Image (tube, rainbow, N blue to C red):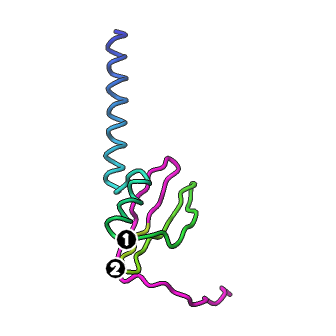
Amino acid sequence: MKKTVFKMTIGLGIMVLAAQQVQAQARNCAPRADVLQRLAETYGETRRGIGIARQGAVMELFASDQSGSWTITVTLPDGMTCLVASGQAYEQMADVLPPNT
């Protein structure tokens, strides 16, 4: 009986780990270093902005002046970085926005 419970516990643990891996892949997530390397080498993007999101996540904007491509990422506290959005025609703005009233 103990062996059966042990095997079931191990099996359940493996299923949970597999589900987490599939979920991370479905969200386009990878370790931060891998994502940054890919953005730099493939798209020539560098970090242009950063902000703190909810639950300790870090939002970053990467962009390329040469190609105009841009990517927004969110890095989770566990070190996984997920792609949130990407696009073209990035331009650096120097305008000062009016204060909120």
Report the residue at 34% width, 79% height from top. Answer: 67
Asked if marks 2 and 1 touch (Cβ < 8 Å), the reply is yes
Q: Quadrant of the N terminus?
A: top left
The kind of secondary structure the magenta stretch mainly shows is loop
Relative to the observer, which residue lies in front, 92 or 101? Answer: 92
- Percent coordinates x, y for residue 45 in the rendering: 40, 70
Q: Residue 81 appears in which quarter of the rendering?
A: bottom left
* Label 1 sits on residue: 44
- Percent coordinates x, y for residue 63 in the rendering: 42, 74
Relative to the observer, which residue lies in front, 61 or 84? Answer: 61
Report the residue at 57% width, 55% height from top. Answer: 56
- Label drawn at residue 70: none
Q: Residue furthest top?
A: 1
Q: Residues within 10 Å of mark 1 (few under 14, many from 20)?
A: some
At numbered mark 2, what does the secondary structure look like: helix, strand or loop?
loop
Task: Indicate whether 45 appears above or below 93.
Answer: above
At numbered mark 1, what does the secondary structure look like: helix, strand or loop?
loop
Q: Residues within 10 Å of mark 2 (few under 14, many from 20)?
A: few
Amino acid bearing label 2: Ser
Left or right, 34 with reference to 57: left
**Start and end of the magenta stretch?**
73-101
Report the residue at 33% width, 11% height from top. Answer: 3
Task: Indicate whether 42 appears above or below 7.
Answer: below
Magenta segment: does it hold 74? yes
Magenta segment: does it hold 66? no
- Percent coordinates x, y for residue 30 in the rendering: 38, 52
Instruction: Answer with mark 2 or mark 1, whichever residue precedes in sequence.
Output: 1
Task: Indicate whether 76 appears above or below 94.
Answer: above
Distance in Å between CA atoms under marks 2 and 1: 8 Å
Q: Residue 64 appears in which quarter of the rendering?
A: bottom left
- Label drawn at residue 67: 2
Amino acid bearing label 1: Gly
